[in-house]
Image (tube, rainbow, N blue to C red):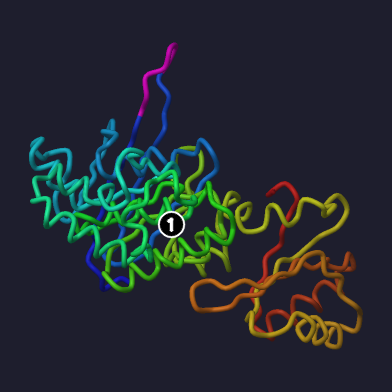
């Protein structure tokens, strides 16, 4: 996506909060470029700084140092009026839907347009259009209490789109939803991205969300960017310990690493696990123990991954390595202390 225009750029961004005894560093030297029209994921553990980061992007939180450049304009140098205008181009949805309980769904969606001075008739017309976009055309007169969690989030998405933003920020927008509803919301976000070309930034602690819908991802750890790249590249070859944790951590909790060595291998997910292992066993002359195996879809491509036990014998281990390299199967050694 290098031919695309940069819509948000963060330069040496830092943020400190004043504590009772000392300042707390929430972000440290963050550098990111997010391109127009992409779905960009930011993933991190609780307390890593990801929600602070997304709030700095639209200046809900003012950075302590560094710059936020949105659509060619440095937000920190804008007047209050100019900043308000810039924010209209940045929609935002949250884990808590923040709907107005006394307003019906149609008037919840029209609300930000009314505040911006759009005539009521035009605001309601736009709200009706957006209800159709999010698949709730029959819920215009319903109230928030009458909707499910997934429906409430669809209303929140419609409201965030009301002012025709260039960017949509999603802060843990699926965290309160069940898996099926999460999938439907992610499918909707993908559809909105493809239909309207809106840049979408997704903040999450779940790797499956990133794998499902994002083009690129930044992994944030201890207030810093640990790594950043195309989702399939980060999945295939994570360069940081926190990256390996997100990709494999929960899967390997039951494996004893004390006296054994393991390799993680990546292969075309359209192939079955058995032929890969069968070919390896034939080529090496001994059976291979599988500690973990899975297949998942990242974007429009299927990936398979396995963690296999590596023979203690040096000669046998070399046979495994030669097979993997001959077959051009990416591999890396994994250790228990990485998870």
Which residue is located at x 68 percent, y 85 percent? 271
Q: Position of residue 66 (x, y in %)?
A: 26, 39
Residue 311 percent coordinates (x, y) = 87, 68
Residue 21 inside the magenta-drawn segment: yes
Q: Decide: few, some or many residues near mark 1? Use Cα within 10 Å; few <14, some 14-19, many ≥20.
A: many
**The quarter of the displayed image where residue 127 is located:** bottom left
Q: Which residues, given as a range, are shown in magenta?
A: 16-22
Q: In the current view of this chain or complex, which residue is farthest to the front? A: 141
- Please name whichever residue, 91 or 260, is drawn nearer the observer in this view of the structure: 91
**Residue 147 is covered by the magenta coloring:** no
Give the residue drawn at x 75%, y 55%.
Answer: 252
Residue at horizontal 27 percent and vertical 36 percent from the top: 60
**Above or below for 66 versus 295:** above
Please give left or right for residue 30 compared with residue 209 in the image: left
Locate the N terminus and report the quarter of the image it occupies: bottom left
Identify the residue shown where x is 33% and y is 68%: 193
Of residues 71 and 32, the one nearer the viewer is: 71
Residue 270 shown left or right of residue 18 in the figure: right
- Please tell me whether residue 286 is drawn above or below residue 163 in the rendered image: below
For numbered disc 1, what is the local secondary structure? Answer: strand
Please name the residue that numbered disc 1 is placed on: 41
Would you place residue 80 above or below residue 218 in this image? above
Residue 323, position in %: x, y? Answer: 75, 82
């Amino acid at each position: 996506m290098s031919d695309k225009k940069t819509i948000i750029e963060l330069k040496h961004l830092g943020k400190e909060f004043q504590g009772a005894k000392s300042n707390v560093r929430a972000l440290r030297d963050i550098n990111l470029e997010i391109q127009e029209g992409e779905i960009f994921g930011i993933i991190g553990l609780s307390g890593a700084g990801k929600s602070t980061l997304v709030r700095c992007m639209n200046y809900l939180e003012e950075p302590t140092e560094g710059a936020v450049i949105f659509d060619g304009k440095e937000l920190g140098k804008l007047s209050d009026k100019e900043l308000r205008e810039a924010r209209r181009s940045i929609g935002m949805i949250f884990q808590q839907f923040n709907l107005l309980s006394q307003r019906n769904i149609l008037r919840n969606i029209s609300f930000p347009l009314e505040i911006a001075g759009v005539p009521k008739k035009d605001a309601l017309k736009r709200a009706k259009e957006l209800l159709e976009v999010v698949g709730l055309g029959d819920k215009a007169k319903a109230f928030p209490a009458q909707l499910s969690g997934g429906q409430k989030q669809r209303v929140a998405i419609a409201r965030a789109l009301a002012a025709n933003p260039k960017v949509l920020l999603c802060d843990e927008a699926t965290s309160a939803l069940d898996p099926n509803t999460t999938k439907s919301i992610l499918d909707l976000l993908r559809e909105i991205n493809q239909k309207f070309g809106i840049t979408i930034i997704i903040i999450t602690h779940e790797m499956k969300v990133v794998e499902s819908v994002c083009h690129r991802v930044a992994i944030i750890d201890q207030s810093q960017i640990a790594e950043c790249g195309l989702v399939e590249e980060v999945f295939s070859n994570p360069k940081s310990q926190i990256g390996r944790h997100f990709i494999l951590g929960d899967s390997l909790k039951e494996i004893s690493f004390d006296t054994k060595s393991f390799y993680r291998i990546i292969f075309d997910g359209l192939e079955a696990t058995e032929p890969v292992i069968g070919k390896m066993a034939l080529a090496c002359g001994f059976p291979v123990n599988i500690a973990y195996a899975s297949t998942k879809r990242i974007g429009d491509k299927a990936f398979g991954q396995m963690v296999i036990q590596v023979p203690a014998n040096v000669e046998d281990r070399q046979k495994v390595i030669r097979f993997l390299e001959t077959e051009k199967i990416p591999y890396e050694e994994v250790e228990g202390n990485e998870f």
